[in-house]
Image (cartoon, helix red, strand yellow):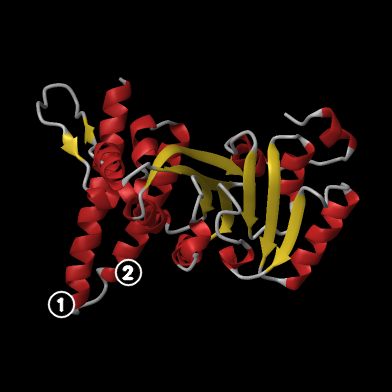
Amino acid sequence: MLNERAKEMGIRLSARLAALADWVPEGARFADIGTDHALLPVYLAASGKIAYAVAGDVHAGPAEAARRQVADARLEEIVSVRQGDGLSVLSPGEADTVCIAGMGGSLIVRILESAGDRLEGVRTLILSPHVAEDQVRRWLREHGYVLDAERLLEEGGEIYTLLRAVKAPDEKEAAERNGELYDIQLPRGKGQDEGLKLPEPLAYEMGPLLVREGGELFRRKWTEEIGKREQILARLRLSDSPETAEKAREWEAKTELLREVLACLHAEKR
């Protein structure tokens, strides 16, 4: 909910940005990468939720728009706008919370991978990839972060994935917590003793917390995904190539597994 100062300033966040803002820890030293107009850091600063923010964007136009937004809000002492690629706008240890939203998962991974010591001291990552979520989850696990929140949110006819991960204190705890997180056994219907052990690649793709939660939006997202895969399968089956036939079998197996997951979640709710 917007506070009085934010209301006076006319700051309005989309549902997705508002959800990301809710996940930012109180008193955070915050960095918003790919900030566009700096709406998120300006809102957080005006609300008094963060101590400091860096608003970074690789493009000159959005960076200039962000500077105007910050100046209009008279928040230059709290929000620093910088133009640069990814986390290059930060100094090591400058931020403890980083948000990267509104881009593909492979680009988010590239930004995180090239950050080097600029991720030093970053305890919380708040991410919203619009594709290739599996790449982001895999990177988090490989680098000692543990997902503590996942959410699906529909806005403008699109279903968005929101992720929050925290840095584990050490490698042992990271391995233990991630091992538990990705060890997913879904119950089948009545009369079937054995549950469905979710393969890790599929858990990376669907989201370990989202799978456990299920829900109507999750079901809709993956029902639509099954429909897309069936269209691809139909095209693959038109080919006489042995390589294409093998690829079709792989796609068919993955699609059938998705159907099985949804059936398990439906059985669990009954």
Q: Residue at x 78, y 58 (%)?
A: 66
Q: Nearer the viewer, residue 85 or 77?
A: 77
Is residue 16 among what the camera can see?
no
- For disc 2, the marked residue is 235
Residue at 59%, 36% in the rendered image: 25
Tag 1: amino acid: Pro
> Between 64 and 155, which is closer to the camera in this rendering?
64
Location of residue 132 with respect to 207 vertically, above or below: below
Residue 57 as seen in the image, left or right of residue 180: right
Identity of the amino acid at label 2?
Arg
First reached walking from the N terminus: tag 2 or tag 1: 2
On the image, numbered disc 1 is attached to which residue? 242
Residue 131 at x, y = what percent?
Answer: 47, 58
Q: Is residue 51 above or below residue 35?
A: above
Q: Position of residue 218 (x, y in %)?
A: 43, 38
Question: As rendered, which of 22 and 169 lies closer to the eye?
Answer: 169
Residue in front for this viewpoint, 24 or 152: 24
Residue 6 point in image, percent of width and height: 82, 36
* Label annotation for residue 134: none
Q: Is residue 196 above or below residue 257?
A: above
**Quadrant of the rendered structure where residue 166 is?**
top left
Can see residue 42?
yes
Task: Report the Cα–Cα distance between label 2 and label 1.
Answer: 14 Å
Image location (x, y in percent) of residue 42:
76, 46
